[in-house]
Image (cartoon, helix red, strand yellow):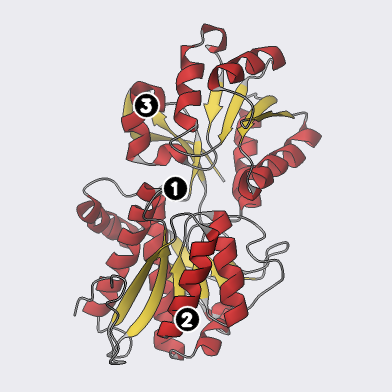
């Protein structure tokens, strides 16, 4: 049977379904397009689990809560979902929000499989309650730094807003590039306008600018400003956090959206499972699915396997991360304890550096693989 996502206030109370709580940014200031893709993946996997007989005959039900990129709202949602009796949590795109949700899930003893957030320190202390599918930021961003060096960029400016996530990214880049002859110049977007960014880039003789800023603003305004400045015709712009992945980027920037490399967590060629899911997600979204949609699908696939094998007891679920061996859309998923990572980690999902093709901005080019 197919079980739709439950709107607030409409949860089943008869105990017949197995419920998973879904944390998703669906309203601003959350990255709504990422949330829509994440939810599409979660919902598709739930539908397929139920078409295949559910969880030992019981339907799987998704109880969705909008985090709106607000850590406090996410914590409140975790509390509510725990009271509603969900077997586990899945989802969340924004790293700072996922960190707050993970801390609360750990405190409550509620298993949380984080689909998309990458911040290395997802929890302050090692925890048995949290697993993660997305590569840690240090892993992915070091691959991005290798790409920069391979493209002969050693004077790299970062336009950064204040955030634990952006600060962590800048630190990873600096620590990795400095011993290899690279320089990272930080531009504080609290005090600089997009036009002033251009002047700083010229003054510092930067050959690359990385956008460690929010989407759509100020990222879109910075791109437009740099593209219009003739002094910066040879400058490469990059967005390791993945802003150009979504269709809104191309809609807002047109031809300016192209040739801005970003990180994407997909293999060079999808497996038969991945290709089938890609077709189903394309139908559901009415556009090509992003890697975030695959992360959502894989999160439910893993949890469904755990719930079938070990039951719905939360402690047994948390104790089972090390025994997971599931075919996901992007490869075999297994979790391990990875040095420097406080949660159970899939090490690693495939990592690519890609951009939109200047000749055809709706098409992606793979520039580098990790």
Mark 3 neighbour class, 10 Å CA radius: few under 14, some 14 to 19, many 20 or more: some
On the picture, is 73 further left or further right than 128?
Answer: left
In the displayed structure, 192 sits above or below 332; it is: above
The answer, for residue 219, to whether it is visible in the render is yes
Of tags 1 and 3, which is closer to the observer?
1
Callout 2–callout 3 Cβ contact below 8 Å: no
Q: How far across and how far down the image is residue 328, in percent? A: 41, 65
Q: CA distance from mark 1 to mark 2?
A: 25 Å
Of callouts 1 and 3, the N-terminal one: 1
Image quadrant where residue 183 sits = top right
Image quadrant where residue 128 sits = bottom right
On the picture, is 72 further left or further right than 51?
Answer: right
Q: CA distance from mark 1 to mark 3?
A: 20 Å
Q: How far across and how far down the image is residue 88, in percent? A: 46, 79
Q: Give the structural element (helix, strand or loop) at label 1.
A: loop
Mark 2 neighbour class, 10 Å CA radius: few under 14, some 14 to 19, many 20 or more: some
The numbered dot on residue 158 is: none
Q: CA distance from mark 2 to mark 3?
A: 42 Å
In the displayed structure, 77 sits above or below 190; it is: below
Say which residue label 3 marks: 253
Q: Along the line of sight, which residue is nearer the eye, 105 or 284?
A: 105
Q: Give the structural element (helix, strand or loop) at label 2.
A: helix
Of callouts 2 and 3, the N-terminal one: 2
Mark 1 neighbour class, 10 Å CA radius: few under 14, some 14 to 19, many 20 or more: few
On the picture, is 237 further left or further right than 44?
Answer: right
The numbered dot on residue 29 is: 1
On the picture, is 267 further left or further right than 248?
Answer: right
Q: How far across and how far down the image is residue 115, in percent? A: 47, 62
Of callouts 1 and 2, the N-terminal one: 1
Callout 1–callout 3 Cβ contact below 8 Å: no
Query: At 38% from the left edge and 34% from the top edge, which residue is drawn?
Result: 249
Say which residue label 2 marks: 82
């Amino acid at each position: 049977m197919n079980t739709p996502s439950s709107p607030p206030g409409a949860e089943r109370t008869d105990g017949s379904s197995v419920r998973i709580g879904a944390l998703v940014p669906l309203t601003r200031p959350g990255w709504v397009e990422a949330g829509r893709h994440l939810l599409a993946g979660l919902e598709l996997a739930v539908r397929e689990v139920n078409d295949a007989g559910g969880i030992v005959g019981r339907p799987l039900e998704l109880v969705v809560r909008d985090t709106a990129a607000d850590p406090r709202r996410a914590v409140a949602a975790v509390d509510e979902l725990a009271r509603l009796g969900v077997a586990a949590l899945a989802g969340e795109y924004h790293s700072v929000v996922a960190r707050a949700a993970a801390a609360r899930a750990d405190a409550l003893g509620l298993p949380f499989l984080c689909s998309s957030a990458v911040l290395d320190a997802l929890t302050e202390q090692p925890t048995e309650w949290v697993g993660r599918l997305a590569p840690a930021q240090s892993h992915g961003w070091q691959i991005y730094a290798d790409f920069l060096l391979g493209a002969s960029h050693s004077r790299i400016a970062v336009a950064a807003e204040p955030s634990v996530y952006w600060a962590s990214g800048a630190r990873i880049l600096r620590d990795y590039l400095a011993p290899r002859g690279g320089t990272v110049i930080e531009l504080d977007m609290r005090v600089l306008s997009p036009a002033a960014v251009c002047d700083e880039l010229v003054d510092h003789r930067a050959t690359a600018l990385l956008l460690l800023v929010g989407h759509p603003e100020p990222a879109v305004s910075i791109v437009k400003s740099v593209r219009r400045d003739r002094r910066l015709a040879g400058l490469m712009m990059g967005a390791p956090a993945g802003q150009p992945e979504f269709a809104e980027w191309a809609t807002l920037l047109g031809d300016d959206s192209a040739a801005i490399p970003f990180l994407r967590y997909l293999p060079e060629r999808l497996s038969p499972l991945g290709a089938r899911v890609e077709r189903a997600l394309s139908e559901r979204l009415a556009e090509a699915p992003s890697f975030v949609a695959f992360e959502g699908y894989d999160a439910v696939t893993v949890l469904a396997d755990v719930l079938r094998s070990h039951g719905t007891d939360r402690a047994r679920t948390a104790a089972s991360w090390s025994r997971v061996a599931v075919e996901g859309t992007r490869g075999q998923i297994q979790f391990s304890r990875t040095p420097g990572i406080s949660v159970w980690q899939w090490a690693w999902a495939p990592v690519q550096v890609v951009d939109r093709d200047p000749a055809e901005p709706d098409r992606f080019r793979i520039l580098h693989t990790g």
